[in-house]
Image (cartoon, helix red, strand yellow):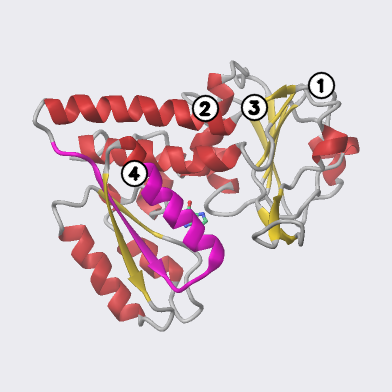
Amino acid sequence: MPLLIDGKATAAQIKSEIAQEVATLVAEGRKRPHLAAVLVGNDGGSETYVKNKVLACEACGFESTLIRFEDTVSETELLAKIDELNRDENIDGFIVQLPLPRHIDTDKVIEAIDHRKDVDGFHPINVGRLAIGLPCFISATPLGILTLLRRYGIETAGKHCVVVGRSNIVGKPMVQLMLQKEHGNATVTCIHSYTQDVAAECRKADILIAAIGRPGYITADMVKPGATVIDVGTTRVPDNSRPSGFRLSGDVDFNTVAPIAGAITPVPGGVGPMTICMLMLNTLAAGKKTYYR
Ligand code: GUN
């Protein structure tokens, strides 16, 4: 069987490292990092993510503030809150949980966030700085994946990395991160809905990263024996045997792919916990003013 990449344990380890660093900061008389999260509406997935972000802040010794709006909130009201958070010196970084209701322009909201507080790394300034290799906040899921590869000693330099999916928050920044000389330093292919012969492209991968949100999409015939397989998928599929009524399903058909992979992330317990953990690392950097004064 392959090496099982344990994101839950790695995230717990990193959060305890962050908590130690925060304890040192506070002992030196410096401020605790403070993250604010803006949640619009009552989407079940978003509620869970934001709750887990607040809990992670507690584990790291950060301050956190949750700001809730009804899903009827106007774009103007939301932009006014963002302006307030941008100016609030007590807030080091903040996020606006996505997706937003359809009547709100998500791009406009993201652009309204001060890039120096954009711990999600979604602002065009952070996206652009990542692309040209300048210090910046990096989107948490791609950063979590690179961190897992590093901590498990999986070589990326000179390897062939195939990213399946081209979303702004995972696929595209993952491509950039794996491409950068100072990060992944890999040869990178990005697969999308217009790619011809997806299976043949995927089989070239030493590192295959699936981020399309289609349960079980990656099957054994698409994987080179010994490859590292990273599963970003977390689709909720109905499951009446669970108290919640659903389970999380990855983009990789784990049972058939695991026997031929060299290393693989499970769902849940793989990439998911690392995403929140990297948001904490970005918040620590925001508190310390590591990237921007
Ligand atoms: N929705 C899904 N993932 C994310 C994320 O990483 N940040 C925010 N703000 N919203 C999300």
Measure the alpha-carbon separation of dots 3 and 1: 12 Å
- Earlier in the chain: of badge 4 and badge 3, it is 3
Observer able to see residue 120: no
Q: Amino acid at mark 2?
A: Thr
In the picture, the disc for residue 1 is 1
Q: Amino acid at mark 1?
A: Met
State the image coordinates of residue 237 (x, y, percent, origin top left).
Answer: 73, 60
Disc 4 and disc 3: Cα gap in Å? 24 Å
According to the picture, the residue beneath numbered tag 3 turns out to be 5
- Whole-Å distance between the Cαs marked 3 and 2? 9 Å
Is 242 included in the stretch rendered in magenta? no
Q: Is residue 204 left or right of residue 291?
A: right
Q: Position of residue 199 (x, y in %)?
A: 86, 42
- Asked if the residue at tag 3 contacts the one at tag 4, i.e. Cβ–Cβ closer than 8 Å, the answer is no
Q: Earlier in the sequence, mark 4 or mark 1?
A: 1
| Disc number for residue 10 | 2
State the residue in front, 94 or 224. Answer: 94
Residue stretch rendered in magenta on the structure: 31-56
